[in-house]
Image (cartoon, rainbow, N blue to C red):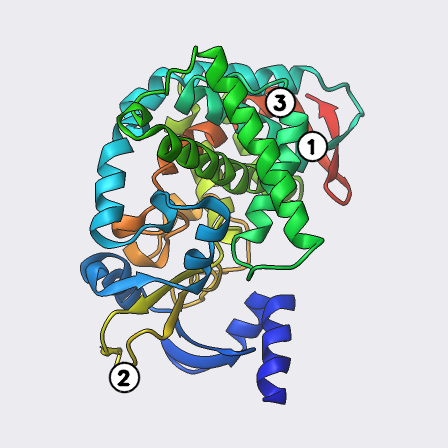
Amino acid sequence: MIGAVRDGLAFRRDPLGFLTGLGGGDVVAFRAGLSEFTLLRGPDTIHRVLVRDATQFGEGKWTLRGERVMGDCLITREGAEHRERRMAIAAGFERRRLLERAPAMARRARTVAESWRDGELVDVQEQMGRIALVAAAEALFEFDLEDEAPALLPALRVLLHEIPRPAAPWPAGRRLRVARAVVDSAIERALRDRQGALPAPLDVLEPQAARREIAALLIAAIDTTPGTLAWTWRELAAAPAAEAALHAELDDPPGGDPSRRPVVDGVLREVLRLHPPVHFIDRRPLADVELDGRRVRAGSFLLLSPLVTHRDDRFYREPQAFRPARWEEDPPPRWAYFPFGAGPHTCIGMHLARLEMAHTIAEVARRWRLEAADGTRMRAVAR
């Protein structure tokens, strides 16, 4: 028991170090705290669980806990209910539709970048969070949350932080209630601006269900994009050659869709490899199953980790290095890269996130270099 508690603390403190230190093969059982897990490392097994045999595996413990925060929504649904909800709202996430909104995403990022001053210390986490929240709300729901962002961002972060955690007593429970009230109020105000009309395609849902989906999607928006963008600037600041290649591509010729440019794409792929927005995807087998020769009991917890597999030297040369060019020179096996998950539970906002990030990278990098400073702050240097 003492060893399990010690391992649980080690897992929370340094999950990557703990998991890479387990040794073993592609299927490794371990205990952390009160829970038993089976870590799946190999591309073939990842493909089987997430894609090929996805219906044989249900959501894991952390996703199920999310219902306490987000309620009944796409992210917390399983099986037929998940497929039904995903089909109902999928039209809002089609790449063609999102491309029509790309100029608005670029304008949001440009407005923030143009507000900086040469030599200013910029809190990149905060600034990228504001861009992500406002741009996603406009692209998905035609909401203008610019004025709401200062209060809404921290409230959404509280909800995000609480998703994988068990229910907590006061005062943690009170913080959750207060944050939920801020988010609900912002959504109600945005809907009043639309004379109560729900945005398509959420207008096919009951009003309360639509509100839950809006809240869940806003949480996802401030989880995925800001962190990835903040890491983008840190990685570029430490890799002058990659930064110079990015600036050269954006300058010659200027304009165009940055998501189609190979250097922008390589930078984004590489940041998502090293710093995936979702570190762990948890599943549970609905019946006893054999995975890579190991018997795994029904209902036990499976752990698939982009954080671990993306840094495996069997699939990536110099896995710890930031090398955007690797995606043209020596790309990894197909299922060794899954920053947005895979299969029926692939992040529904993947295309939105990639478009947002590509346009933000372009708008910022055309104007600024960001140099390391302290904490989440970086120094903006005019190009």
Write down the residue under mark 1.
370
Residue 89 in sight = yes
Q: Earlier in the sequence, mark 1 or mark 3?
A: 3
Residue in the picture at 36% in, 75% down: 300
Name the secondary structure under disc 1.
strand
Of tags 1 and 3, which is closer to the observer?
Answer: 3
Name the secondary structure under disc 3.
loop
Write down the residue under mark 2.
295
Residue 173: x and y, percent? 64, 52
Residue in the picture at 44% in, 14% down: 103
Q: Earlier in the sequence, mark 2 or mark 3?
A: 3
Q: Amino acid at mark 2?
A: Arg
Does residue 314 sit above or below 368 in this rendering?
A: below
Say whether residue 354 is left or right of residue 158: left
Write down the residue under mark 3.
148
Q: Earlier in the sequence, mark 2 or mark 1?
A: 2
Tag on residue 279? none
Q: How many marks?
A: 3
In three-dimensional space, the C-alpha distance between marks 2 and 3, rounded to whole angstroms, equals 50 Å
Residue 325: x and y, percent? 45, 44
Residue 163: x and y, percent? 52, 52
Q: Amino acid at mark 3?
A: Glu
In three-dimensional space, the C-alpha distance between marks 2 and 1, rounded to whole angstroms, equals 49 Å
Indicate the quadrant containing the N terminus: top left, top right, bottom left or bottom right.
bottom right
Q: Nearer the viewer, residue 265 or 48?
A: 48
Crowding near the residue tagged with mark 1, few <14, some 14–19, many ≥20 C-alpha atoms within 10 Å:
many
Residue in the picture at 28% in, 22% down: 96
In three-dimensional space, the C-alpha distance between marks 1 and 3, rounded to whole angstroms, equals 27 Å
Say whether residue 42 is left or right of residue 174: left
Residue 233 in sight = no
